[in-house]
Amino acid sequence: MFKDRVAVITGASSGVGWETALLFAEEGARTILLARSREKLAALKAEIEKRNRQADYYVLDVSNTDQIADTFERIITRFGKIDLLINCAGFGKFEYAASTKIGDIKGMFDVNVVGLIACVQAVLPQMISQKGGHIVNVASIAGKISTPKSAVYSATKHAVIGFSNGLRLETKKHGIFVTVINPGPIRTPFFQIADPDGNYSANVARFMLDSSFVARCIIKAVKKKKREVNLPWYMGTGARLYQLWPRAVEKLTEHWMNLK
């Protein structure tokens, strides 16, 4: 179903973005890879082309909104359209709110929220014009259940969920669908920045998702036009229970919430 469709993936240089790009390419999409590392993007492009599929890449820092506007304009000019936008770019730093540096706070919001919104704004006029498109925003279970040492990171992902829900209602009349993906911890380079000491990674190692699994869930969600996907299922169930009985859930899961 993705043959001849143009799919743009941010954060494509590693983890979920990398695996998602590979899957969309295998399904026949023309994949456009976006990330900061030219070397990693070139390596992914080579891997995709080795499988007799098509890919192109543009070096992009999603915290730079001017660069976002310019890059997406170049993509649309060259390929004529963007059918799919998969926003995988993001980062976090696990630290208590009281000691989180303002620079880190701004950095997380610039990438996870402002940059994501800027990417969406860059594709919307063209998607509205063609009366169709699909936007996937990768948020996090942390956007539904905030825990100690992730208050700021959780705030950014909560913002992504809220933005995605409103965007879905705004764009429905234009034939554009919006999916939000909320994974739990994933085995990716994310934790090299978020958890440099490795304590949290060690504590939750048995619960970590593989990035390839998350990528498969993303492509499945696009095919089935899923509104929201929570991964793994039991964390999604926990998030729903938390909305109903927050005090009870906090009391029962206090040990797990303090693993960072």
Image: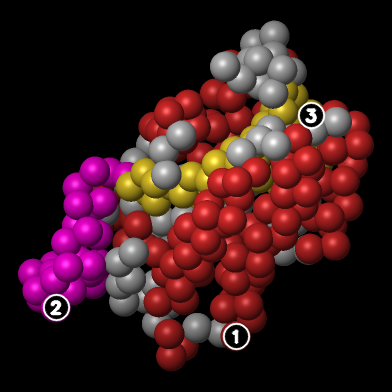
The disc at residue 247 is 2
Image position of 250 with respect to 46: above or below: below
Image position of 211 with respect to 259: above or below: above
- The residue at which mark 3 appears reads as 56
| Residue at x 66% of width, y 21% of height | 29
Please check the rendered image and state whether residue 141 is part of the magenta-colored stretch, yes or no.
Answer: no
Label 1 close to label 2 by CB (< 8 Å): no
The quadrant where residue 75 appears: top right
Q: Secondary structure at mark 3?
A: strand
Quadrant of the rendering where the N terminus is positioned? top right
Q: Which residues are magenta?
A: 231-260
Percent coordinates x, y for residue 222 in the rendering: 49, 32
Q: Secondary structure at mark 2?
A: helix
The quadrant where residue 78 appears: top right
Mark nearer the viewer, 2 or 3: 2
Q: Amino acid at mark 3?
A: Asp
Q: Amino acid at mark 1?
A: Ile
The secondary structure that dominates the magenta segment is: helix
Q: Amino acid at mark 2?
A: Arg
Q: Secondary structure at mark 1?
A: helix
| Residue at x 72% of width, y 41% of height | 127
Mark nearer the viewer, 3 or 1: 3
User: Which mark sits nearer the N-terminus, 3 or 1?
Assistant: 3
